[in-house]
């Protein structure tokens, strides 16, 4: 595992874009696994800038997102599909058919999870998976206690995640209680993993996940076992490591 300490959020975002861009330039047909949340916003801003200044071409790139709230339609402003369109997809030359987010409104949830796993396999797997980490150690929506061998499934959000994510919704009651998420096993299949974290609020969980034992109680800790894992944090996030 490599650990990069960035000075601040801007440096962290810039370093992450360098890592992602290397993949895009070396393999114009790369498959990127993407995340939502606050942490990747600077990364997406930089990717858009680099695209607009002619440094990156997304025409052959495929993006496969980690997760989506169950029950939210793509047009819902808090859906992860909407987020990705707003912050990345609509600003770059990626083909719409090459952007993938689980369907939050699928009539048959189990079929949707199977479809998502088959989709990842049909694209030849994920070349680089971008991850954030929740304050409770979740990656995607794999909450503490998730069985490591799981693939894409419907997860029940913990109270801690509902609390952490309510800032995006008008009222706490509006936060969906379930979400479709790639499983730990789906994530671990990616050829390369890049986890980004920023701010003092992530310091304690990073210490537990990367300096403590590998345990389902801290889902991100499983990443210690990945052969090509990079943790990229700013000074505050890495302050306890
Ligand atoms: C988002 C996701 C989540 C977030 C995590 C951190 O697609 O899968 O696991 O990465 O909750 O979120 P932020 O970056 O908002 O702290």
Image: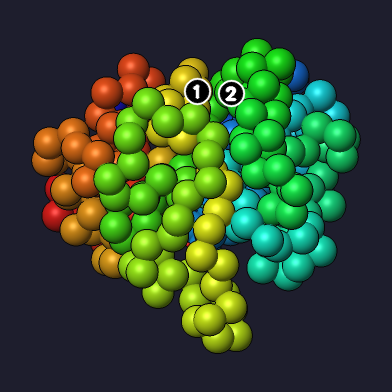
Label 2: which secondary element:
loop
Q: CA distance from mark 2 to mark 1?
A: 5 Å
Which residue position is annotated with label 1? 190
Q: Residue at x 33, y 31 (%)?
A: 148
Residue at disc 1, CB closer than 8 Å to ligand 1: no
Q: Residues within 10 Å of mark 1 (few under 14, many from 20)?
A: many
Rendered view: 145 above or below 223? below
The residue sitting at 69% across, 53% down in the picture is 104
Residue 175, visible in the rendered structure: yes
User: How dense is the environment of label 2, judged by Cα within 10 Å: few (below 14), some, or many (20 and up)?
Assistant: many
Identify which residue is drawn at 86% across, 34% down.
97
Q: How is the image coloured?
A: rainbow
Q: Nearer the viewer, residue 153 or 208?
A: 153
Image location (x, y in percent) of residue 91:
82, 52
**Which quadrant is home to the N terminus?**
top left
Percent coordinates x, y for residue 82 in the rendering: 75, 60
Q: Nearer the viewer, residue 220 or 144?
A: 144
The residue beneath circle 2 is: 126
Q: Could you say which is closer to the camera, residue 136 or residue 12?
A: 136
The furthest residue to the bottom: 171
- The reply to whether dot 2 and dot 1 touch (C-beta < 8 Å) is yes
Asked if ligand 1 lies within 8 A of label 2, the reply is no
What secondary structure is found at the residue carrying circle 1? loop
Q: Is residue 8 left or right of residue 137?
A: right
Q: Image quarter for residue 76? A: bottom right
Q: Please report whichever mark, 2 or 1, sits nearer to the chain's N-terminal start.
A: 2
Q: Is residue 222 left or right of residue 161?
A: left
The answer to whether 234 is drawn above or below residue 127 in the figure is below
The correct choice, above or below, for 71 with respect to 95 in the image is: below
Q: Is residue 100 above or below residue 87?
A: above
Total number of numbered labels?
2
């Amino acid at each position: 595992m490599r650990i990069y300490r960035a000075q601040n959020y801007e440096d962290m975002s810039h370093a992450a874009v360098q890592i992602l861009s290397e993949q895009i330039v070396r393999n114009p047909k790369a498959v990127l696994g993407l995340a939502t949340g606050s942490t990747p916003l600077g990364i997406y801003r930089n990717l858009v800038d680099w695209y607009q200044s002619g440094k990156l071409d997304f025409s052959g790139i495929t993006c496969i997102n980690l997760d989506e709230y169950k029950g939210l339609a793509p047009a819902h402003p808090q859906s992860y599909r909407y987020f990705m369109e707003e912050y990345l997809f609509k600003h770059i030359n990626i083909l719409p058919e090459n952007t993938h987010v689980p369907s939050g409104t699928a009539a048959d949830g189990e079929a949707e999870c199977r479809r998502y796993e088959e989709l990842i396999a049909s694209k030849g797997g994920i070349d680089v998976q971008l991850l954030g980490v929740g304050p409770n150690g979740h990656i995607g929506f794999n909450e503490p206690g998730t069985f490591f061998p799981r693939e894409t499934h419907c997860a029940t959000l913990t109270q801690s995640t509902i609390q952490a994510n309510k800032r995006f919704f008008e009222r706490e009651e509006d936060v969906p209680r379930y979400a479709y998420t790639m499983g730990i096993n789906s994530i671990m299949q990616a050829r390369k993993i890049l986890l980004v974290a920023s701010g003092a609020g992530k310091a304690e969980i990073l210490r537990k996940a990367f300096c403590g034992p590998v345990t389902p109680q801290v889902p991100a800790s499983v990443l210690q076992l990945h052969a090509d894992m990079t943790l990229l944090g700013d000074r505050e996030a890495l302050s306890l490591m």
